[in-house]
Image (cartoon, coloured by chain):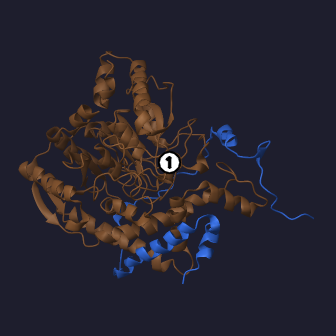
Amino acid sequence: MDELYKKNLRELLNLLDKNEVSPEEIYSIFLNRIDKEEKKINAFITKEEKLIYNKNGYIKGIPIAIKDNIITKGIKTTCASKFLENFVPPYDATAVKRLKNAGFSIIGKTNLDEFAMGSSTENSAFFTTKNPWNLERVPGGSSGGSSAAVASLEVPVALGSDTGGSVRQPAAFCGVYGLKPTYGRISRFGLVAFASSLDQIGIFARNPEDIAIVLEIIAGKDPKDATSSEKGTEKYSDFYEINPKNIKIAVLKVPEKSLSFEIKNAYRKFISFFEKNGFILEEVNIDLWEYGLYVYYIIASSEASANLARYDGVRYGRRAKAKNIGELYLKSRSEGFGDEVKRRILLGTFSLSSGFYDEYYMKAVKVRNKIAFEIKSIFESFDYLILPTTPETAFQIGEKSDDPISMYYSDYFTIPPSLGGFPAISVPFQIGEKSKLPIGFQIVSNYFNERNLLSLAYFYENEIKFENKIIRRF
Amino acid sequence: MKNFNKIFELANLEVSSNSEIEKDFEKIVNWVEKLKEVNTEDVKPPEVYSNIMILRKDIKNKFEGREGILLNIPEKKDDFFVVPRVVKNG
């Protein structure tokens, strides 16, 4: 019973159904596990000591961790920013509300790069989360707290958010599954806005089935988010049978120099996994892929500069001492935001400013659309697209923190699917022989094909059995 | 050349707060200029964005979090936000 924290969501549900364990026992075992692991991992900003859950929900109090940029009524939500250090939301995000209705309990709020801007959690105003596989390495980001918590068995499942790769990249670095659904599949109401045309709530777990269970709870139209899709949801955990000889997979042709030696070799093996299983594979090229990064940094920063204009020190959050109202805005913002947030606000303000708007922002919007069409055209002849999640395995803490542009390259493979709004999942593949760190790859599919995506991931996990590797390691 | 001070002013951020940021900003702006290589005549928006922004009916809803909002105000008097004076005397 003491090792219940090794169980995944499906297994815990089965034990609860058979009355072999109580919700209280489960919660206290996970609290103990968190206490023990947090001494080295630092995944959580806030921990909830008390079990609170809806007794009518079928999840029966199983704990979930929530990234600290998704608001939770009555539980501090900081966005890992000094600006919101003491902010207590007066309502729940729609995704959180749906989780609670289904019976999940919120066990804590996880660390991130400030306002989700970063790839390592080093931009958190509070502390850096450690990669459970190697404590000198980053867990990835921005949802690094959630990915590390799931990998180190502190929780079975967690929510994150993905704007340009913030769920998939940390999932790959920590050896877990991370889904970014189609733009509009999950309501963004209550997800603190960074780049509204790209932001999407995502899910971490140690297997695809657990992700599917959470997705079917939180997906679907929400009147409070006009960009949430009216397209009906599906029973995502009811997986399609995978018949490889009828499935066509596009394999992204990747310039050799863009991958580390270890990932280059692993990519070949990942591809041959699908070959050996009888799938139909063909290499494809996406000409504009490399421009995704520039497009992303202009568009995401532009939207961030507008979204973060609300932090003025008047209604909530940090307020600086000031003699007049102008100084109040200026000082509250200058003292409250970290460097990366400032860099992005500045780039965005510049891209949207008079005289530069057409040359930067509009240009980026047009190239974004071209990239989206290029990816879309692949799904006219293929069911899935496979590609690396990251150019390298988890890097050292401090290795890139002085060079923002080299940090941006961490999202090289995750950004284009985000620009087009496509659903994508990062799946763990193997542990690097030399680095001893996890390596993950992406599977992308057409709009709203989450059920197909998770079905293939389920087939894959049944063969690869990566969840066992995590359980044995931690 | 770009007027960096003007951008800081528009963003409501202090210029002097960190000179590293200014250097990075210039580097990043030069970096994204690579986009100019792409030909972008005749581009349409992708379909995932074509069915969004459907407005909901304009019905009044009761918001239960009023107290919670008041609790987050950094400086208040009764139920009002306090800010430094914004109108001139007399």
Total numbered circles: 1
x, y percent for residue A336: 61, 54
Tell me where residue A311 sits by quadrant: bottom right
Residue B41 visible in this rendered orientation of the protein: no
Tell me where residue A23 sits by quadrant: top left
Q: Badge 1: how crowded within 10 Å, few (<14), some, or many (20+)? A: many
Q: Colour of chain A?
A: brown
Quarter of the picture containing the C terminus of chain A is top left
The residue pinned by badge 1 equals A189
Tell me where residue B19 sits by quadrant: bottom right
Q: In the drawing, does residue A255 fall left or right of residue A318?
A: left
Q: A94 or A322, which lies in front?
A: A322
Q: In the drawing, does residue A90 fall left or right of residue A41?
A: right
- Judging from the image, what secondary structure is the residue with disc 1 in? loop
The chain identifier of the residue carrying mark 1 reads A
Q: In the drawing, does residue A109 fall left or right of residue A233?
A: right
The structure residue drawn at horizontal position 40% and vertical position 46%, both measured from the top left corner, is: A144
Q: In the drawing, does residue A124 fall left or right of residue A367?
A: right
The extreme top residue here reads: A20
The chain displayed blue equals B
Q: A167 or A151, which lies in front?
A: A151
The structure residue drawn at horizontal position 53% and vertical position 67%, both measured from the top left corner, is: B20
Height in image: B37 above or below A311? below
The structure residue drawn at horizontal position 26% and vertical position 38%, both measured from the top left corner, is: A207
x, y percent for residue A378: 21, 64
